[in-house]
Image (tube, helix red, strand yellow):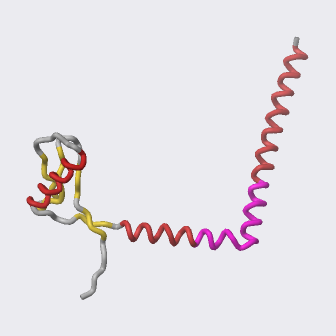
């Protein structure tokens, strides 16, 4: 009986070693692929291009909150009701300090007026 247990332990031990060898081979294979990409001159331009796209997206998506008049907020709420077939009777103002910046409908819809940040000279 003890021989079977010992064989089982040896089998488990050797399978774990094979598992570690497979992981090491996978890592060295990945390193070879990465080295090939670096040597081919594809990886560095791709990284710079990705960084450029991410920077452009971040800068172009920057927005600031714009104040609304009560009439504009009410008009936006009426447009929301028409497009979404909303049956709500009331809406609540969303304010930033003393300024009205949007509304929240009874149905849960929130509308906050945002405008891209731009630098206009003039």
At x 20% / y 66%, what residue is drawn?
A: 66
**58 over 24 or under it: above or below:** below
Q: Main secondary structure of the magenta part?
A: helix
| Name of the residue lying farthest toward the right | 3
Determine which quarter of the picture holds residue 58.
bottom left
Magenta stretch in the rendered image? 28-48
Residue 75: percent from left, percent from top: 13, 57
Where is residue 99? Give x, y as percent. Answer: 12, 62
User: Does 73 sit above or below residue 41?
Assistant: above
Residue 83 image position (x, y, % from top left): 24, 49
For residue 18, what is the image quadrant? top right
**Residue under the point 76% across and 71% down:** 39
The quarter of the image holding the N terminus is: top right
Which one is nearer the viewer's eye here, 20 or 73?
73
**Residue sitting at x 88%, y 22%:** 7
- Above or below 100: residue 82: above
Confirm whether the magenta stretch covers residue 59: no
Query: Which image quarter is the C terminus in?
Result: bottom left
Left or right of residue 16: residue 76: left
Q: Residue furthest bottom?
A: 122
- The structure residue drawn at horizontal position 15% and vertical position 41%, both measured from the top left corner, is 88
- Residue 40: in magenta span: yes
Q: How many marks?
A: 0
Q: Position of residue 79 (x, y in %)?
A: 19, 53
């Amino acid at each position: 009986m003890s021989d079977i247990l010992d064989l089982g332990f040896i089998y488990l031990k050797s399978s774990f070693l094979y598992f570690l060898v497979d992981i090491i081979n996978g890592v060295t294979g990945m390193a070879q692929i990465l080295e090939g990409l670096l040597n081919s001159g594809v990886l560095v331009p791709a990284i710079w291009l990705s960084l450029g796209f991410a920077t452009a997206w971040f800068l172009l998506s920057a927005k600031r909150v714009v104040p609304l008049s009560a009439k504009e907020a009410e008009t936006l709420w009426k447009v929301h009701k028409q497009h979404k077939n909303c049956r709500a009777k009331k809406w609540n103002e969303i304010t930033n300090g003393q300024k009205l910046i949007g509304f929240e409908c009874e149905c849960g819809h929130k509308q906050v007026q945002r405008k891209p940040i731009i630098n206009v000279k003039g």
